[in-house]
Image (cartoon, helix red, strand yellow):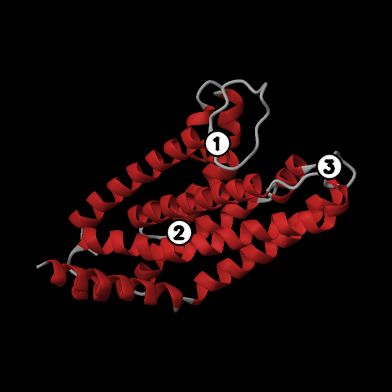
Amino acid sequence: MSVSSSKKLTYILRAELGKLVTLPLIWHTLIGAFILNLVLAAAFTSAGLQEASGMQSILNIGLASMGYLQAGFIILGILATCSEYTGGQIRTTLTTIPWRGFQLCTKLLALVMITVPAAFIIAASGVLYTFIMMRDTTVVIQIDTMLRTLLGATGYLTLTTLLSTAIGALLRRTTPALVILLGYYFIVSPLWRDYLPGIRNYFPDTAGYYMFMPTSSDEINVLSPLQGTGISMLWTMFFFTVAIVFYRRRDA
């Protein structure tokens, strides 16, 4: 029985991974995010050369584009689920793989396998560019700090992608999902942070920033990277659980 379950998981994972890697929009989104990140890193680095140097400055400048870069991973997550509904391929998927909850979980696992390396490479490219351009101003290079920060950035982009995937599974349409998520991350959340300072750290995007952004010791109500990760994971798990419930109960 365990062998059969293992083969079933391998089959479904291979199928979901194959669908993702053969979807041109996935690669167009990742390539676009990579290019955008380098362009923004160049712009922020050019401005940052006139500021104070050091490892903290390089990390801040190299990851300054994260606020814009997350849009690409939001699109990535939405495309992973909504693309199947556009042409009606979801009916074929559910006919072949009738275990809906299992299929959606496997899709997320396949998406993680793509997102984690892509997020790390894209985030690292901005930091690496900044480091190369500002290497003459750097006194001490703390590799462990840089690696820990890059892992936090990778985790944030991955959780953002998974949360977007859950929203896409709930709405099943690309445009409404894009409008809601991009509207939240770029309009609603910044406004709420100004009017609701007491709870702003518990928003998924704000909590996620603490996963990778260095903070000053005098900042009030600061979260640790572990706390930020926990809150972001709770948001992702909540929406993913709701998505599975609706996914199993309604028609394709």
Real-space Cα separation, disc 2 to disc 3, in angstroms: 36 Å
The secondary structure type at the circle numbered 3 is loop
Real-space Cα separation, disc 2 to disc 1, in angstroms: 19 Å
Write the residue at 33% across / 49% down.
240
First of labels 2, 1 by sequence position: 2
In the drawing, does residue 207 fall left or right of residue 54? left
Q: Residues within 10 Å of mark 3 (few under 14, many from 20)?
A: some
First of labels 1, 3 by sequence position: 3
Q: Residues within 10 Å of mark 1 (few under 14, many from 20)?
A: many
Q: Disc 2 marks which amino acid?
A: Gly
Q: Which residue is mark 1?
A: 206
In the drawing, does residue 37 fall left or right of residue 109? right
Quick one: which residue is furthest to the left in this view?
Answer: 1
Counting labels gives 3
Write the residue at 61% across / 26% down.
194
Q: Disc 1 marks which amino acid?
A: Thr
In the drawing, does residue 251 fall left or right of residue 104? left
Q: Which mark is residue 53?
A: 3
- Where residue 31 sits: x, y (%)? 61, 70
Write the residue at 56% across / 30% down.
192
Please state which of residues 16 and 28 is positioned toward the viewer in this rendering. 16
Q: Is residue 124 above or below residue 221?
A: below
Q: Disc 3 marks which amino acid?
A: Ser
- Where residue 94 sits: x, y (%)? 22, 70
Would you say residue 182 is visible in this rendering?
no
Q: Which residue is mark 2?
A: 77
The secondary structure type at the circle numbered 2 is helix
